[in-house]
Amino acid sequence: MIARCLSGTEGGGNMPMTINQFRQLASYNRWANARLYAAALDLSDQAYRLHIGVLFSSLRGTLNHLLLTDRLWLYRLTGEGDHPNRLDAILYEARAELTRARIAEDNRLIAVVDNYDDAALANLHSYKTTSGMPQSQVLSDILLHLFNHQTHHRGQAHACLSILTGGEPPSLDLLVFRRGGTAQMRNTNPCRFVPQG
């Protein structure tokens, strides 16, 4: 409901989001994922895999779910890339591989959003659901869903980190991102933790 009101498609919302706002959300998404993954890479493997009662069982399950749903939506938007069939699939057992894949998908999402303009946001986009049902949605609603879904499950992953460490995970607030911009992201780049080669 909130997303529809923001995009102006239901409930009297009259201020549709602009492509620049979606570009900001795509950049924020990459920044927040970098901070989240940096903290996740600091955990023991046992803690990372521990079942703690979230929807996808563990931090491992939650982070894999986020990657696979981004791949699913990017496939629906572009017709390219992987099309996972199960929402609970574990795409990568190793955190280093998952991190590299996350970085690549975040960069891909930014590139896809950068190719749209304000006019494209109002267009209907047709796709098939995971059950094969054809659907058509306004592109801005699809993008809002994608970013809202990321925020929802990233919040679960953030809670996992709080539970597992007993401490406060890094802030993922949009306003922190806006204050620090891209320079802040460089300080939390998870690539520094990922073995190369």
Image (spheres, rainbow, N blue to C red):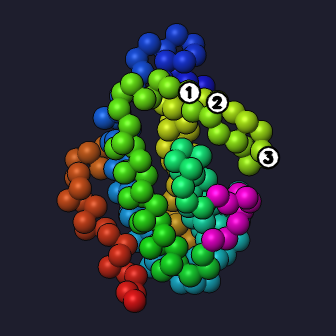
Number of callouts: 3
> Residue farthest to the top?
12
How many neighbours does mark 3 have within 10 angstroms: few (below 14), some (14-19), or many (20 or more)?
few
Regarding residue 140, the answer to whether it shows in the image is: yes
Kind of residue indicated by mark 1: Leu
Q: Which residue is mark 1?
A: 124
Instruction: Please report the bounds of the magenta region as a residue range.
Output: 83-91
Which image quadrant for residue 128?
A: top right
Residues 183 and 105: in front is 105
> Residue farthest to the front?
79
* Mark 1 vs 2, N-terminal side: 1
> Could you tell me if the residues under marks 1 and 2 are in contact, i.e. CB atoms within 8 Å?
yes
The residue drawn where x is 28% and y is 61% is 185
Q: Which residue is mark 2?
A: 136
Q: Is residue 142 above or below residue 41?
A: above
Is disc 2 placed on a helix, strand or loop?
A: strand
Kind of residue indicated by mark 2: Ser
Which image quadrant for residue 100?
A: bottom left
Q: Which residue is mark 3?
A: 131
Report how far apart the C-alphas of labels 3 and 2 lie in the structure.
Answer: 15 Å
In the rendered image, residue 66, in percent from the top left (x then y), is placed at 57, 58
Report how far apart the C-alphas of labels 1 and 2 lie in the structure.
Answer: 6 Å
Kind of residue indicated by mark 3: Ser
